Amino acid sequence: MMRTIRGALESVMAAAAVASVFRAIGITRTPRQTGGWRRLEGPDLQ
Amino acid sequence: MRVAVLGAGAVGARVARQLLSGDLVDQVVLRDTDADRLAWVSRSLGDRLIIEHAPFPASLEADVVVVATPGGTQLPAVVDALAHQRPVITTGDGLAETVAMLKLAPQAQEAGVSVVLGAGFAPGLSCVLAAHGAMWLDHVEEIHVAKAGTGGPACALVHHRALSRIAYDWRQGQWARNPGGSGRSLCWFPEPVGPQDCYRAALVGPVLLHHAFPQAEWITSRVSATRRDRLSAPLPMLAPPHSEGGPGAIRVELQGKQNGAHKAVVLGVTERPAVAAATVAAIAAEWALTGRLKKQGMAGLAEMVDPVGFLHDVQARGLVVEIFEGDHAPT
C-alpha cells in the first residue's frame, strides 16, 4: 500500500518537474495573451 | 412614429425604455402574454408607453416591429409583420428559427420592407464588429466569434439547448457539422470577463455571417461554458434560469489579407448581454424608422447598417467597443 502511494506521489512529482521545465523554456499548454485591449475611438471609427 | 415591441422580458422592456428615452419615437406599444410583467414594466416608462396583454403574432399598427419574444415565438410574429408590410427587427439567436425566417427573404424583398435578423449582442453587435473589422482588410479569410454570458431566461434556455445540438461552422465551401459542446478554445475577452473556455454550439452567427461574407473560407461561433453546462446540456435545465445574467462579452476575430500581407483584427465588447442586445435592437429600430438601413429584404446587421455610424451610436449609449492590440492574439 505504502509503495503504491509512494509511486503515485513520485509520478506526480515527476510530471510537475517536467511541466516546470517546459514552462521555464517557454512551452506552455495554455496560450498567453501578449497584448491588451483598448477602446476603439478616433481614427478607428472613420 | 410608433414602434411595437413584442416581448417585455429582459431585452424587450429595455428596448422600450431606450426608444422612449429619445424624441424620435412618439409611442411604444409593448405587448406580452404576461400581465404581471407588463404592469411591472409600465410603472417606470411613462404615458408614451401603451401596454397590450395579447398573443405575440396578433396584428398591430406600428411603423416598426421589434420582436423580442422567446425562441420559438418569433417566426409567427415576423410572418404577421411581413403580411402587413412592416419593417421588423428580431433579437432571436435560435438557429432553426432564424434559418426558417431566412426562407421568408423573398417575401420581404417582394414586400419592399427591411427585416433585420438577430439584432442582439451575438448575433447583432458581433455582426457589426465583423463588418467593421472587414473594412480594414482587403480580403477576409476567417471570422471567429465567441460569446460569454447570457441575457434573460429565454437567452439562457437557448444557450443551454445549443450546447447539446449540432453546431454548424462554415469551412472551405461547405457547412461542417460538429456536436455542440465540442472544440474547446480558450478565448480572451475584454476585461473584466477575461479568458474563458468556449465551445461549439448550435448558434446562428455563422449563418448570418456567411450571408454577409460569402467569400470567407472559415466562419465559426462559440460560447463560453463550464463543465457543468456541457454535462447537463442534454437534460432539461436543472434549475430555473436566472432572470438576468451577469457580465457578458463578445469577441470577434477576423483573419485576412491587407496589401498582400496577413493581418488579424480582434474586436470585443463587455456588457450585460440583455443590456447590449436591447441597445443594439433599439438603435436598429431607430435606423429603420429614419430610413438608414442599407437594403430591403432580410439580413443580419452586417449587411443592413453602415458599421462606423452604427458603432458611433452604440458608443454614444455607453457600450465600449474595444480592439485587441498585441504581438499575438490567441483564440
Image: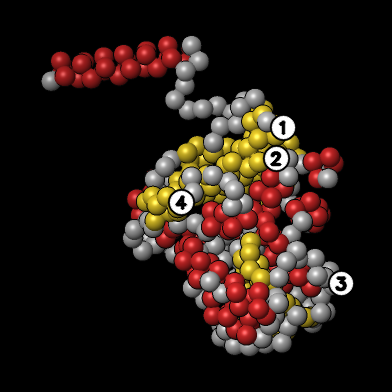
Q: CA separation, marks 1 and 3?
A: 45 Å
Question: Which mark sits nearer the N-terminus, 2 or 3?
Answer: 3
Residue A44 in the image: state x and y as whole percent: 79, 41
Q: Residues within 10 Å of mark 4 (few under 14, many from 20)?
A: few
* Three-letter amino acid code at the position of disc 1: Asn
* Vertical arrangement, residue B158 with respect to residue A34, above or below: below
Q: Nearer the viewer, mark 1 or mark 3?
A: 1
Q: Residues within 10 Å of mark 3 (few under 14, many from 20)?
A: few
The answer to whether tags 1 and 4 share a subunit is yes
Which residue is disc 2 drawn over? B138
The answer to whether tags 1 and 3 share a subunit is yes
Which residue is disc 4 drawn over? B174
Secondary element under disc 4, as helix, strand or loop, is strand
- Which label is found at residue B136? none
Question: Which mark sits nearer the N-terminus, 3 or 4?
Answer: 3
Which residue is disc 3 drawn over? B23
Residue B100 in the image: state x and y as whole percent: 50, 71
- Which label is found at residue B259? 1
Residue B308 in the image: state x and y as whole percent: 79, 51
Question: Which mark sits nearer the N-terminus, 1 or 4?
Answer: 4
* Quarter of the image that includes the C terminus of chain B: top right
Q: Are marks 1 and 4 in contact (CB under 8 Å)?
A: no
Secondary element under disc 2, as helix, strand or loop, is loop
Question: Is residue B94 something one can see in this rendering?
Answer: yes
* Three-letter amino acid code at the position of disc 4: Gln
Q: Are marks 1 and 2 in contact (CB under 8 Å)?
A: yes
* Vertical arrangement, residue B115 with respect to residue B143, above or below: below
Residue B73 in the image: state x and y as whole percent: 52, 76
The answer to whether tags 1 and 2 share a subunit is yes
Asked where in the image residue B121 lies, by quadrant, the reply is bottom right
